[in-house]
Image (tube, rainbow, N blue to C red):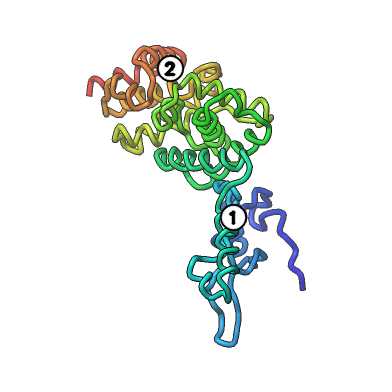
Amino acid sequence: MIRKTLKECPECASKNIYRDQDKGETICRDCGLVIEDRMVDFSQEWREFDDDGASKRRTGAPTSETSFDRGLGTEVGSTSDFYKLGSERERDRFFRLRKWNIRISTAIERNLKVALAELKRVSSFLKLPKSVEEEAARIYRLAVQKGLVRGRSMESVVAGALYAACRRHEVPRTLDEMGEASGIEKKEIGRTYRFVTRELEISIKPSNPADYIPRFASALKLSPETQSKSVEILEQARDIELTSGRGPTGIAAAALYVASLIHGEKRTQREVADVAGVTEVTIRNRYKELIKKLKLGKDVEKSKKK
């Protein structure tokens, strides 16, 4: 009997259903009901069954965009295997085959081998998740295949691809952080990022300032209440379109600065600016806008009197 896929929650009739493949659960995002907790995994079987039972030996590594050959490359044996061959002539022939097998033939493969190693280094420095690393490698591979790397440094294209992948996966990283990790100027990374996304027709959503709040708050050692208040301020600013046309890091840092004043966890504008990678002038201007437009002056004054 084939079980039909549920299209709505039996409790609240919501269609916002989430299927967690790792836990094997089907959950309603609106009411939190666990609709199913024993999902059948239809993915590939990685075990091997023989007379001794189930073996955990893998049948091969999964493909990966972060490898120049996507992890599908093969090798011509090991050196010890050659001595099992009959004649010396056969051994010499396999030695030559192994040597040519190790060599990378095309220019694209040589470029990818060097560039993807740099991509892994920058990704590790920025502590990016594997999904972002895979997406960045895919973007860079497409850029190489379309000849977008010509006339540009490999490092700048790698940084641009990583920044685009961070934006697509909503992993907040600033251009300053990307420049520090890659050793490329911020303007060059931004220019390359815009060129690659335009040529490859990659759609990028505008950055959400609230995504930066947890990182900035953690660096400033602010309380969860202050974080929540800063997100609330950003939501109010978004409702009156105060966030449009302004840098997400600057408005996020200013909201966090206002929230810290309201909750009595005073941080200087210099401290907030250093963490956010913006200037004190930016913090000051955004702070004044938030205080004036959202009428938060009274809340700030009350906290100062306490």
Residue indicated by mark 2: 290
Residue depicted at x 49% and y 37%: 171
On screen, residue 54 versus residue 123, left or right, reads right
Residue type pointed to by label 1: Asn
Label 1: which secondary element:
helix
Between residue 274 and residue 295, name the one nearer to us. 274
Q: Residues within 10 Å of mark 1 (few under 14, many from 20)?
A: some
Residue 27 in sight in this render: no
Residue 45 sits in which quadrant? bottom right
Residue 83 in sight in this render: yes
Placement of 109 over or under 48, stated as above or below = above
Placement of 192 over or under 44, stated as above or below = above
Residue type pointed to by label 2: Leu
Residue depicted at x 53% and y 76%: 84
Q: Position of residue 284 (x, y in %)?
A: 36, 13
On screen, residue 247 versus residue 217, left or right, reads right
Between residue 131 and residue 148, name the one nearer to us. 148
On residue 286, which mark appears?
Answer: none
Q: Position of residue 200 (x, y in %)?
A: 67, 30
| Residue situated furthest left in the rendering | 306
Q: Position of residue 116 (x, y in %)?
A: 52, 41
Label 2: which secondary element:
helix
Q: Residues within 10 Å of mark 2 (few under 14, many from 20)?
A: many
Residue 167 sits in which quadrant? top right
Q: First in sequence: mark 1 or mark 2? A: 1
> The N terminus appears in which quarter of the rendering?
bottom right
Residue indicated by mark 1: 101
Residue 232 sits in which quadrant? top left
Between residue 34 and residue 163, name the one nearer to us. 163
Between residue 33 and residue 146, name the one nearer to us. 146
> The C terminus appears in which quarter of the rendering?
top left
Q: Position of residue 207 (x, y in %)?
A: 53, 28
